[in-house]
Amino acid sequence: MSSPRRLLAAIALPLLLPLTACGAQAAEPAADAADGYPVTVGNCGREVTVEAPPQRAVSLNQGSTEILLSLGLADRMVGTATWTDPVAEGLEEANATVPRLADNAPSFEKVLAQEPDFVSASFASTLGEGGVAAREDFENLGVATYLSPADCVKSNEGDGDGVREEPLTMDAVYGEVRDLAAIFGVAERGEELVAELQERVDTATADVDASGVTVLYWFANSEAPYMAGCCGAPGIITGAVGADNVFDDTHAEWPQINWETVADRDPDVLVIGDLTRERQTAETAEAKIRFLETNPVTQHMDAVRNERYILLSGAAMNPSIRTVEGIEKVAQGLRDLGLVD
């Protein structure tokens, strides 16, 4: 029987030969890299099995990419895609060695051209029907796939990036780190990364109690703005600092809410996504603040008049290891605004 990689190459070659020539070379596995394999992890209602540590991984979302880079796996990556922001601080050098296939979602053919042996993603909208490809499309070619558990514990139907019946916790993110570390044979690195993230959360929130402070999270779009509902990554941040989200009465991940309703809720603080992508209107924090301060509906809001803004990367507002950065920046922002001791 042909190996999965040979099967993949045979299927993809006629269409992708010009692209394949420039693919990155796979890193040489350590002599004992296959010890303990095959490895199987449960993932979103299915089992993912790898026969050996992946050597040609493609990560289709920034969140997944930054976990792999943080685990020291850049030399086993042959592509990344779908970015909202610059890579996390400290990962710049490693990230520069990995080809970026697209700033947004790449084509299925572009991914196949890298001859991947493993594909990971943060969102079902990327690794699923209507995205780059369904998981089955990769798996039928012998390519193992992994989807962030944070996106599996919610309904992905409807608008607003789906609905969460239960609040997300950092345990889902830590579980993703541990799963990917196990798949790549670097379990110890995974535990070290989780411990580091937990320590950062503890340090950031040790002396913060924002009880009574109301916040709103604006991700993108000025015409029909995406605001955070109760229970996604912003819910983790809000709960960690003890504040209240003015839209905690909706379970949609990112509902689109009209400005009249936003002004009526009149939060104390506006947490604003500062994105570098170019997909929606008002992506950058500068554009968002300009809109808020000139729009007749929003310019009289208390937070706008008093310039109570906290800026976050888009990555920090999505379920990922960057959510810890979100906790740190919101906690510090509340201190800087004089809203907590």
Image: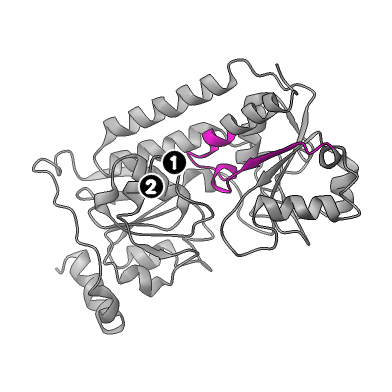
Image position, residue 35 (x, y; %): 14, 39
Callout 1, which amino acid?
A: Glu
Position of residue 325 in the picture relative to residue 193 (left or right): right
**Image vertical order of residue 240 relative to residue 273, above or below:** above
Position of residue 147 in the picture relative to residue 252 (left or right): left
- As drawn, the label of residue 89 is 1
Identify the residue under disc 2.
Answer: 92
Residue at 52% in and 20% down: 202
Query: Badge 1 local density, few (<14 within 10 Å), some, or many (20+)?
Result: few
Residue sitting farthest toward the left: 31
Position of residue 230 in the picture relative to residue 29 (left or right): right
Residues at marks 2 and 1 touching, judged by CB atoms closer than 8 Å? yes
- As drawn, the label of residue 23 is none
Image position, residue 50 (x, y; %): 25, 50
Image position, residue 19 (x, y; %): 29, 76
Q: Is residue 293 magenta?
A: no
Residue at 36% in and 36% down: 178
**Image vertical order of residue 202 relative to residue 268, above or below:** above
Residue at 27% in and 63% down: 142
Task: Report, in whole angstroms, how far the alpha carbon at label 2 lies from the one at label 1.
Answer: 7 Å
Segment tinted magenta in the rendering: 306-326
Asked whether residue 201 is in view, the answer is yes
Q: How many marks?
A: 2
Residue at 22% in and 71% down: 7
Q: Secondary structure at mark 1?
A: loop
Q: Secondary structure at mark 2?
A: helix
Query: Badge 2 local density, few (<14 within 10 Å), some, or many (20+)?
Result: few
User: The N terminus is located in which quarter?
Assistant: bottom left
